[in-house]
Amino acid sequence: MSEEMDSKKKISGQMVTIILLIGLVACLLTYMIYDKTVIAQEEERDKAYQDGLESGFNLAVMQIAQQASNGQQVPLQLGNQTINVISVETCLANIGGG
């Protein structure tokens, strides 16, 4: 009888080990899936942010160029310094044509 009890204890110990290993693998897989999802969301958010920055920068440069090409002086503030941008081509054309 004691051999039978030892055998049952051994099998039950192995079952506990197998169940624990399956649980551990399930936890690791869940973490990996969660981590990939979070990383994908962060990359998507960063790309949207970068696209917004690039779009805003392009719009600002286009507006400065458009104002300057109309012969207007465009003041740009860089820190505590102000720079005035003027289209040289427009000014020369106005002088030469007028």
Image: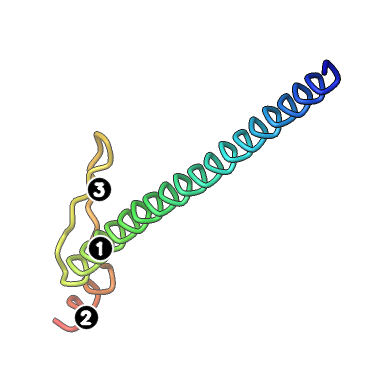
In the structure shown, which secondary structural element does the residue marked by tag 3 occupy? strand
- Which of pointers 2 and 1 indicates the residue nearer the eye? 1
At 27% from the left and 41% from the top, the residue drawn is: 78
Mark count: 3
At 21% from the left and 66% from the top, the residue drawn is: 68
Circle 2 residue:
96
Q: Residue furthest front?
A: 1
Circle 3 residue:
83
- In the rendered image, residue 92, in percent from the top left (x then y), is placed at 25, 74
At 37% from the left and 50% from the top, the residue drawn is: 45
Location of the N terminus by quadrant is top right
Location of the C terminus by quadrant is bottom left
- Left or right of 86, for residue 9: right
Disc 2 residue crowd, few under 14, some 14–19, many 20+, Cα 10 Å? few
Badge 3 or badge 1: first in the primary sequence: 1
The amino acid sitting under disc 3 is Ile
Query: 25 or 81: nearer the eye?
Result: 25
Q: Which mark is residue 59?
A: 1
Q: Residue furthest bottom?
A: 97
Query: 21 or 40: nearer the eye?
Result: 21
The amino acid sitting under disc 2 is Gly
Q: Are marks 3 and 2 in contact (CB under 8 Å)?
A: no
Disc 3 residue crowd, few under 14, some 14–19, many 20+, Cα 10 Å? few
**Location of residue 97 with respect to 82 vertically, above or below:** below
In the structure shown, which secondary structural element does the residue marked by tag 2 occupy? helix
- Left or right of 75, for residue 35: right
Badge 3 or badge 2: first in the primary sequence: 3
- Left or right of 94, for residue 61: right
- Left or right of 95, for residue 39: right
At 25% from the left and 38% from the top, the residue drawn is: 81
Q: Are marks 2 and 1 in contact (CB under 8 Å)?
A: no
